Image: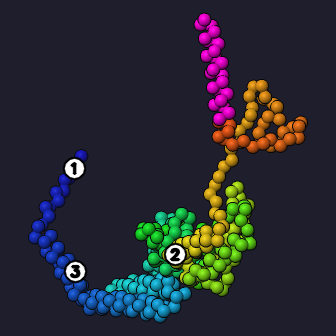
């Protein structure tokens, strides 16, 4: 068998260089030929970019003086800017690549959208919640809200999260999805706000007189609203005091005003009650001693609490000092008796 070996001629270096140069020359020629299209595409995209900025500023300017639409205007401006830039990109790509079709890009985005949706599910959820918050407007920028353990002033409402500034100077970033699905207390939703406080008076004081004095002190405090009117109510017969709740209204309802009015009203009520002889007692305790030893154990006539059984007599109260003196005397007599017995034994 004869095997013929065909040798491949070595590549010609000169031929390769010429081929590479031809390709480079073709690329340069194509670029130069398409240069007007490239420049036009760049100009079109720049025009759309500035148009998008102008649309955003226009929307924000139209909603700036409207308190109810201020936050929504910010988001609508951002969305309009993004959509306009995206349209400009489509137009620029169509000019740059004549074979490019928007349907191809839409199809590509549809295929990749499923994967993006799973990967960025939380982000999309917060985005939709942010849009709904801005549309429904349960609270606005500069409102003071309470959310779970956080309380402060709303600084900004974005499409992903809402930022609040706490009263002690900290910033809290809360995802919009949590704000939308949980309860939020808006302290500045209305122009007026009611404050209340329980004042304790003694059981021996006149309740009607105390209520009148508390109401006078509240109404005499500068800044307290007369309409709605303040009122006072007996709320509880506590262990040591009769609790009377005073309620009054203020405007504006912001945190600093609430603390200021609370300070002034409590000071005025305290001074008013004290000046008129109304007692504001502090907690006290009564201690009852049992006359209960091994000999008298179970004998209700010798116990100090409640009504004794049998005799029907009410036990007389004894002071602590008298009880201690009696105890000391009994111990002294026992010691003397013990010493006397000891002396007898020694003898």
SS category of the residue bearing label 1? loop
Q: Which mark is residue 3?
A: 1
Q: Residue at x 86, y 41 (%)?
A: 313
Identify the residue position indicated by label 3 in the image: 27
Q: Which mark is residue 260?
A: 2
Distance, label 3 to label 2, CA atoms, is 77 Å
Q: Residue at x 65, y 68 (%)?
A: 277
First in sequence: mark 3 or mark 1? 1
Specify whether residue 337 is painted magenta. Answer: yes
- In the rendered image, the residue lying farthest to the top is 347
Q: Against 289, is 155 above or below?
A: below
- In the rendered image, the residue lying farthest to the left is 14
Crowd class of label 3 (few under 14; some 14 to 19; many from 20; radius 10 Å): few
User: CB of mark 3 within 8 Å of CB of mark 2?
Assistant: no
Q: Main secondary structure of the magenta part?
A: helix
Q: Nearer the viewer, mark 3 or mark 2?
A: 2
SS category of the residue bearing label 2? helix
Which color scheme did the rendering employ for the protein? rainbow
Q: Quadrant of the C terminus?
A: top right
Where residue 158 sits: x, y (%)?
A: 47, 76
- Image: magenta residue range: 325-347
Q: Nearer the viewer, mark 3 or mark 1?
A: 3
Where residue 130 sits: x, y (%)?
A: 52, 76
Q: Nearer the viewer, mark 2 or mark 1?
A: 2
């Amino acid at each position: 068998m004869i095997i013929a070996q065909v040798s491949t001629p070595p590549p010609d270096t000169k031929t390769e260089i010429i081929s590479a140069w031809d390709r480079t020359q073709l690329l340069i020629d194509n670029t130069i030929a398409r240069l007007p299209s490239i420049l036009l595409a760049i100009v079109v995209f720049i025009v759309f970019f500035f148009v998008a900025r102008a649309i955003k500023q226009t929307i924000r300017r139209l909603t700036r003086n409207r308190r109810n639409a201020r936050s929504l205007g910010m988001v609508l401006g951002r969305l309009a800017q993004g959509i306009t830039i995206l349209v400009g990109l489509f137009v620029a790509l169509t000019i740059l690549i004549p074979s490019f079709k928007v349907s191809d890009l839409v199809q590509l985005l549809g295929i990749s959208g499923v994967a993006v949706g799973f990967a960025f599910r939380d982000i999309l959820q917060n985005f939709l919640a942010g849009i709904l918050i801005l549309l429904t407007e349960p609270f606005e920028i500069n409102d003071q809200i309470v959310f779970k353990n956080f309380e402060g002033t709303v600084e900004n409402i974005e499409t992903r999260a809402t930022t609040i500034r706490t009263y002690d100077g900290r910033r809290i970033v809360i995802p919009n999805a949590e704000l939308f699905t949980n309860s939020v207390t808006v302290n500045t939703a209305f122009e007026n706000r009611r404050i209340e406080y329980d004042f304790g008076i003694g059981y021996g004081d006149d309740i009607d007189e105390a209520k009148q004095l508390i109401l006078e002190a509240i109404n005499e405090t500068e800044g307290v609203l007369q309409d709605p009117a303040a009122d006072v109510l007996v709320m509880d017969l506590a262990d040591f005091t009769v609790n009377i709740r005073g309620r009054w209204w203020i405007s504006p309802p912001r945190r600093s005003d609430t603390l200021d009015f609370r300070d002034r009203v409590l000071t005025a009520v305290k001074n008013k009650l004290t000046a008129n002889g109304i007692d504001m007692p502090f907690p006290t305790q009564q201690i009852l001693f049992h006359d209960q030893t091994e000999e008298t154990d179970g004998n209700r006539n010798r116990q100090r609490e409640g009504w004794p059984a049998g005799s029907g007599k009410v036990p007389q109260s004894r002071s602590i000092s008298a009880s201690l003196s009696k105890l000391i005397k009994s111990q002294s007599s026992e010691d003397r008796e013990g010493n006397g017995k000891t002396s007898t034994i020694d003898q």
